[in-house]
Amino acid sequence: MSREHVAVIGAGLTGSLLAAYLGRRGYRVDVYERRSDPRVTGAERGRSINLALSERGIDALRRIGLADQVLAGALPMHGRMVHPLDGEANFQPYSLAGDRAINSIGRGALNDALLDAAEQTAGVTVHFDHPLTGLDPETGTLGFADGTQAKADIVLGADGSGSAVRGLLLAYAGERFDETVSFLDYGYKELTIPARDGEFALDPGALHIWPRGTSMMIALPNPDRSFTGTLFWPMGGTGSFASLGSPAAVERHFRRHYPDLLELIPGLADDYRHNPVGLLGTVHCGPWQMLGRVALIGDAAHAIVPFYGQGANAAFEDVVELDRCLDATGDDWAAALPAYEKGRRENSEAIAAMALANFVEMRDKVADPLFKLGKSIEHTLERWLPGRYVSRYEMVSFSTTPYAEVRRRVRRQHQVLAAAGLLAAAGLAALVGRAVTR
């Protein structure tokens, strides 16, 4: 039986993985990418945001035999190394035993590996320098910037947060399609912490955070023994990207707020001047699919802010879910696409909310002694109640428990603990009362 011809728009992380999955199912897949081949041109300067690959993403790679290959080029990070403005850096493990890790990997390196895998899959062809400019959802006709056209039975938009497919669906459907893009009043800029005497300048086994209340910097290790640092600063006001323009102003700001980093970033002025400021936002839209033949996937459907390290992991889960729905429906796309949206929408909303909440935790709370005490108590509960009490971070990063179920379980756990606390307090009060009346 011949299968539908599928067009995947976007050859980034999600599109490349999706193409490999579909090719293995026997589909003829054409991938259209607006950029030139990044394996030839290299990654755009200052736009990488190193990825924290965790169990959800690894599971998706494992299913098609890519996990070991990808992880061979990744660096495990077993916890956060928090650098307060005053005092010594302190390490906060991610898991109870300290043995679990998220994996630092460059976006460019992962994209290259997935592109190779897609192109090596029978039936998959990748077309670079093909910006999408037109889409007829009813016929599957695609138009490109050079005036050429193509046609496919199924069109899948995997073209990121600024998705052209999403924009064309909005133009086609009008009021039948909802789109909201909520930007933070924060942006990001990347800096490089080079190796020192051929070695890492910081502990490579940790994700480093410099929390400063209303802003922060993080740094993730690279295989060449450098670190990619990322500033998350306000877009306006004091201490913002807008207010710090000159090299002298940037150096003064770092001397005051990140004094331990000045000697570690010899290219600070050059990086700050030349690397762009990226925007941070959350995409909500719907429906994700139309006419049983056009759909959005990954960031094109539900981009989130990067503060839980789950953007790529969540997108890879989308691919797994779509693959599962194709299995369940016997490759009936008209049934599979609505089922895929139903299976992923609640989970995408859950991780979007958790990612926003984690920004506050990372920039502000991780340096607070009460927060550290809370984490210690949380690990104690995990030790006392194995399998019954599991932290939010543990479930998000080290399991494939659906994001929405993570939120529900964490709420239940907190309710039980609050009730136990009230009972304990009442019992203590009763004991004190009896002692006083004797």
Image (cartoon, grey):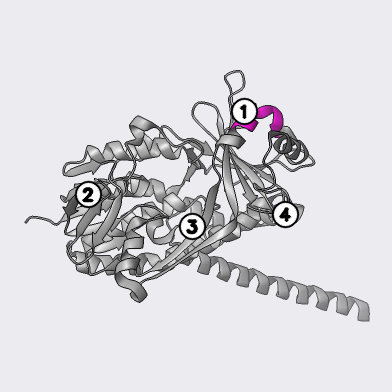
| Mark closest to the chain's N terminus, 3 or 4 | 3
Mark 3 — residue? Answer: 304
For mark 4, does the 10 Å Cα neighbourhood hold few (<14), some (14 to 19), or many (20 or more) residues?
A: few
Residue type pointed to by label 2: Gly
Q: Is 120 on the left-hand or right-hand side of 429?
A: left
Expressed as whole percent of the image width and height from the top left, the position of residue 78 reads: 56, 41
Q: Nearer the viewer, mark 3 or mark 2?
A: 2
Which quadrant of the view contains residue 2? bottom left
Stretch in magenta: 261-270
Mark 1 — residue? Answer: 267
Q: CA distance from mark 4 to mark 2?
A: 61 Å
Which secondary structure lies at badge 4?
helix
Residue 135 magenta-drawn? no
Mark 2 — residue? Answer: 147
Task: Name, please, the residue furthest toward the top.
Answer: 197
Mark 4 — residue? Answer: 373
In contact (CB < 8 Å): disc 3 and disc 2: no
Q: Is 37 on the left-hand or right-hand side of 432?
A: left
State the predominant SS element of the stretch in magenta: helix
Q: Nearer the viewer, mark 3 or mark 4?
A: 3
Q: CA distance from mark 4 to mark 1?
A: 37 Å
For mark 2, does the 10 Å Cα neighbourhood hold few (<14), some (14 to 19), or many (20 or more) residues?
A: few
Residue type pointed to by label 4: Leu
Q: CA distance from mark 3 to mark 4?
A: 29 Å
